């Protein structure tokens, strides 16, 4: 008989996979965000895993070095590649890695300008070499310009509803391609993406900061589309993240929007700002990347200088008094463990949509994989929900 070695019982030796990339929520979430673009050829799994393997949890400089280094390595390999489609996808991945590298930089960091230039150039190279049909445009707005990209669908897309997609508190116009455009194109839809004040290039290039009156930039974008294309029978506006406030706000004032999706819901930003303000009272908060980034981004995108000013500026961003004006079909998406938006805000929004043609709320739990903010890491789940809703409501 062979003697059993001394040691813990088999049950104590059990090994398990990991549910998180970092203990810090921002680092974990932004890793998921980079990986989320895999399905649309905007990332590769082991490229990202290799990049994060040398990042100390919470070290923002190491984050920049890792992802900018990955972007450069990805670009450097392109010259030796003979396949145009592979080149195009490599440029799209490089774009995403530059965007990810830039994300945690302070607004006044000198590295932002160069990184921004390289991420836009990489994206444009990617679309061109991958043969992705698109039309970039800018339109006058206030003291600057709004940016947009229209992606026509395959033959027959004009007979389907037009999907319009806008981001949120920290998104960029180019990123929206990976969020939905490819998935929509595969299903026969055309997609209009745009940025308003406070977002992406509109903020960086023209200095325009957020406005709670989101119907104004949205109306300007829809006017442009009607002038250059046609007026769709149905226009479906999806707002991502803070867009969960922006899109419903626009729908409350523009009857051309016949369907609106809060992806995810954001009913009242003031309540969220109060939570961050309370956290800031802790002396240790100054070292917390989650809070530092949130406050920096608020001041930058709102055009203010201090946390109290940011909280005051955010208070008007509530759907409380306007949700009752929405007459479109409404789809509300909720992540059970959304670290930005309390799930209870979905209930408040649903109750307030008293004039909507229909209201559906879908909550993604932990076991589904979609419990994070905007279902990051489980893109196929919200896509299935959204496109099924589109078929039921618009044929």
Image (tube, helix red, strand yellow):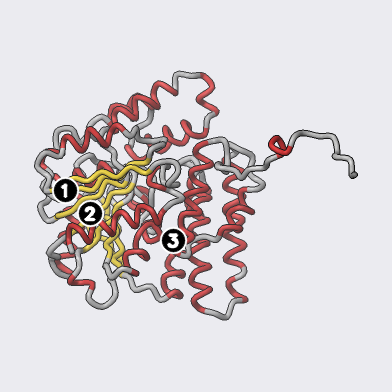
- Judging by the rendered image, the residue that carries numbered circle 2 is 237
Q: Position of residue 330 (x, y in %)?
A: 19, 48
* Residue 304 visible in the picture: yes
In the image, taking residue 57 as reference, residue 358 lies left or right, namely left
Q: Which mark is first along the chain, 2 or 3?
A: 3
Q: What is the quadrant of the C terminus in the image?
A: bottom left
* Residue 114 visible in the picture: no
User: Do labels 3 and 2 touch, CB within 8 Å?
Assistant: no
Q: Nearer the viewer, residue 301 or 169?
A: 169
Q: How crowded is mark 1: few (under 14 residues within 10 Å), some or many (20 or more)?
A: many
- Residue at the far bottom in the pictured view: 82
Q: Position of residue 372 (x, y in %)?
A: 42, 42
| Up-down relation of residue 97 to residue 18 (above or below) | below
In the image, taking residue 187 as reference, residue 323 lies left or right, namely left
Tag 2, which secondary structure?
strand
What is the CA distance from the residue labelled 3 to the residue labelled 2?
A: 24 Å
What is the CA distance from the residue labelled 1 to the residue labelled 2?
A: 8 Å
Q: Residue at x 27, y 62 (%)?
A: 192
User: Do labels 1 and 2 touch, CB within 8 Å?
Assistant: yes
Nearer to us: label 3 or label 2:
2
Tag 3, which secondary structure?
helix
Q: Nearer the viewer, residue 244 or 106?
A: 244
- Judging by the rendered image, the residue that carries numbered circle 3 is 120
Numbered label attached to residue 251? 1
Q: Residues within 10 Å of mark 3 (few under 14, many from 20)?
A: many
Q: Position of residue 228 (x, y in %)?
A: 18, 69
Tag 1, which secondary structure?
helix
Q: Quadrant of residue 242?
A: top left
Q: How crowded is mark 2: few (under 14 residues within 10 Å), some or many (20 or more)?
A: many
User: Do labels 1 and 3 touch, CB within 8 Å?
Assistant: no
């Amino acid at each position: 008989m062979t003697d059993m070695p001394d040691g813990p019982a088999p049950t104590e030796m059990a090994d398990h996979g990991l549910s998180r990339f970092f203990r810090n929520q921002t680092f974990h979430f932004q890793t998921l965000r980079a990986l989320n673009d895999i399905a649309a050829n905007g990332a590769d799994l082991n490229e990202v895993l290799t990049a994060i393997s040398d990042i100390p949890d919470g070290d923002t400089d190491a984050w920049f070095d890792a992802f900018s280094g990955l972007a450069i390595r990805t670009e450097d390999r392109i010259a030796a590649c003979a396949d145009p489609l592979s080149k195009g996808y490599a440029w799209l991945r490089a774009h995403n890695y530059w965007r990810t590298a830039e994300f945690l930089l302070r607004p006044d960091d000198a590295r932002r300008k160069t990184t921004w230039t390289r991420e836009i150039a990489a994206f444009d190279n990617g679309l061109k070499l991958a043969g992705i049909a698109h039309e970039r445009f800018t339109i006058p707005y206030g003291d600057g310009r709004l940016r947009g990209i229209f992606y026509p669908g395959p033959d027959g897309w004009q007979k389907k509803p037009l999907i319009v997609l806008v981001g949120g508190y920290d998104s960029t116009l180019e990123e929206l391609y990976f969020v939905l455009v490819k998935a929509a194109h595969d299903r026969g839809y055309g997609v209009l993406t745009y940025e308003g004040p406070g977002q992406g290039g509109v903020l960086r290039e023209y200095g325009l900061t957020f406005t709670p009156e989101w119907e104004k930039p949205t109306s300007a974008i829809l006017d442009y589309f009607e002038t250059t294309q046609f007026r769709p029978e149905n226009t479906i506006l999806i707002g991502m993240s803070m867009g969960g406030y922006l899109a419903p706000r626009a729908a409350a004032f523009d009857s051309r929007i016949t369907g609106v999706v809060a992806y995810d819901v954001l009913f009242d930003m003031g309540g969220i700002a109060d939570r961050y303000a309370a956290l800031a009272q802790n002396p240790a908060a100054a070292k917390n990347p989650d809070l530092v980034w949130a406050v920096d981004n608020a001041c930058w995108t709102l055009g203010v200088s201090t946390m109290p000013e940011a909280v005051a500026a955010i208070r008007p961003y509530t759907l409380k008094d306007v949700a009752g004006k929405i007459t479109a079909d409404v789809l509300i998406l909720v992540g059970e463990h959304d670290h930005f938006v309390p799930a209870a805000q979905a209930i408040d929004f649903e109750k307030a949509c008293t004039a909507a043609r229909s209201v559906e709320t879908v909550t993604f739990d932990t076991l589904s994989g979609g419990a994070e903010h905007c279902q990051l890491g489980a893109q196929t789940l919200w896509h299935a929900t959204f496109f099924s809703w589109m078929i039921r409501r618009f044929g």
